[in-house]
Image (tube, helix red, strand yellow):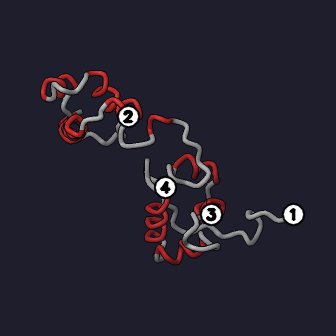
Amino acid sequence: MPTTNTGPKLAPLPMQVRPVLGEGIASYIQRLAQANHLSPDELTAVLCPRGRARPPELHLLAQLTNSTVDALRRALPDAPGRVNTDPNRAGPFPQRVDHALPSLFDRVDLLMALGEALHFGVHRNVLRHRYPRLRRHLLRLALQHQPRQHRPPHLR
């Protein structure tokens, strides 16, 4: 019985691009197309043979990127068939923080504190004094769930 994985095997694209941490599949396809001097529409037409309204076929993307379907599922958070292994990563804040901050003002304070911590390297104890309404454990939990970024040399 034929499956969707059978059919002509696609040759890998000449320029390979790695997915960026937390990058969506549409953004990855766009960067892959740009690196190979293709339009995103041309690449999407190859990856979505059943129509653009459907998600891209991961087995086709794996062939073009010379990767495996499992590796793409792990790297791309919105890849079809991906199982969310961490329920705390569903939104911009972990679920525990999301439920504990019903007030819009508390959410704004938390976003401001996270922005200061990310851009200026402000320590969480300093943030706790600047934003006294935020509970200490929520601030710590939110800071732990932020993606790591390259720190400027003056903050090392």
Comes first in the chain, label 2 or label 3: 3
- Residue at 49%, 59% (x, y): give it: 25
Residue 145: mark in rendering: 2
Q: Whole-percent x and y of residue 147?
A: 36, 40
| Relative horizontal placement of residue 154, taking residue 43 as reference (left or right) | left
Q: Is residue 123 left or right of residue 97?
A: left
**Which numbered circle lies on residue 57?**
3
Question: Quick one: label 1 or label 4, which is nearer the N terminus?
Answer: 1
Sort mark 4 into few (<14), some (14-19) or many (20+) by Cα contacts within 10 Å: few
> The disc labelled 3 sits on which kind of residue?
Glu
Q: Quarter of the image containing the N terminus?
A: bottom right
The residue tagged 1 is 1
Kind of residue indicated by mark 2: His
51 is higher (above) or lower (below) than 73 = below
Q: Label 4, on which residue?
A: 18
Q: Secondary structure at mark 2?
A: loop
Instruction: Give the mark nearer the N terminus: 3 vs 4.
Output: 4
Q: Nearer the viewer, mark 3 or mark 4?
A: 3
Disc 1: CA contacts within 10 A as few (<14), some (14-19) or many (>=20): few
Residue drawn 64% across and 72% down?
50
Q: Nearer the viewer, residue 47 or 78?
A: 78
